[in-house]
Amino acid sequence: MSFLNFLKDIYQTDDSFDFNHIQKITPEWIIYIIGILDFSVKSLKFARNINNNFLTDILLALVANPFMQLETLDLSYNEISDELLITLVNLLINNRVFVNLKSLILYGNKIGDIGAKALSTYLASNTTLISLNLNNNRIGNSGVIDINLALETNHTIRDLYLSKNQYDSVGATSFGYLISRNKNISSLSISYTDVSDANNISNSEVVTNNIAYALTKNSTLKKFILNNSNMSLADNDAFAFAVQKNKALLCCKINDKTVYIDYLNRNKIIWENHYWSRQRHLEFVDYPYKYFNQLIFNKYEDTFHSMITSTLLCGSEFNIYLPPEMWEYIFSFFQRKNIMVSI
């Protein structure tokens, strides 16, 4: 393959370069290619476990190329440390390459509180970034609080992903303040956030009540995801009430491993009368296999039937993941209820 054909292989439509699907390309080659590009590039992706030292060189090569005008930068799975993120933030703030940046993807790195604090200084004054993905990092309480404080004055961020980090109920509380004060965020994901506190059982309810109350007052958030967060029945009830009052949410995923079935059954009227009638979408996919058996399904058959049929009536989806031993039973259930299904 000629070098020109090689470049065409990684060059994609919409002025996008994606190094992710090119096997065995070395960081040295990435640096070289970035340096010789002589056409506009708006999207750059290299989620490749690149060494931090090489990644620094790649970033420096980016800012040295006059043709770069990035709108999307994906640096997922590169083990980015706090130190490297500080370097990145300085480049984001001070270079024309990133003046139009709209999407920053930092999924699956090693970013902690120090890096989050540095990033918050960028967010506080930024006027272009629309989407920020920090899922699966090491951000703790102080880091997530710093980010949320910065976003209280940020007017451009629409999508925020902070799932699978290391903050607990203390950091989670700050999302209540963010939801109540930020009028621009339309999608928020904070799954795998342990809202419980072993030393203070009531603290879980304080956190969830704070977030749930903020949801009742928010009119801009369209999608809210808080799966696998170790909530109690009372916590789930607080969110059921919030969904009833909220008039803007289109997609709400609040699935808990141990209480989800009871929660839906206890709040059946709320989901029927308010959730489904406004053509919303509840994705029932995170309930663990070990709790989902024929005994459970029989116990709550009326609830499941109501959820499924009301969803179909409003033209929405009803997604359900089942263990293989439940397939035959669930299909017989659908047949009895005259519900058409597809696999």
Image: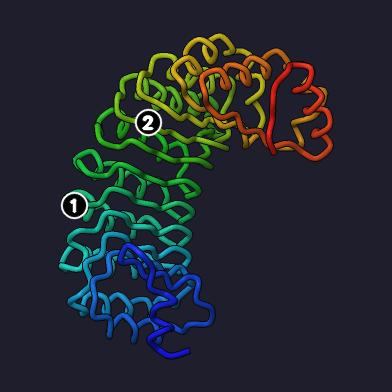
Dot 2 amino acid type: Lys
Question: Compared to 136, does 49 lie above or below?
Answer: below
Q: Secondary structure at mark 1?
A: loop
Q: Which residue is mark 1?
A: 126
In percent of width and height, residue 6 lies at 43, 83
Residue at 66% across, 33% down: 320
Image quadrant of residue 337? top right
- Labelled disc at residue 300: none
Residue at 48% x, 28% y: name it: 203
Vertical relation: 9 (above or below) 201 = below
Quadrant occupied by the C terminus:
top right
- Helix, strand or loop at mark 2: loop
Disc 2 target residue: 222
Residue 75 in the figure: left or right of residue 269:
left
Q: Indicate the quadrant where residue 308 lies.
A: top right
Can residue 4 be seen from the camera position used here?
yes
Residue 176 position in % (x across, y down)? 35, 30
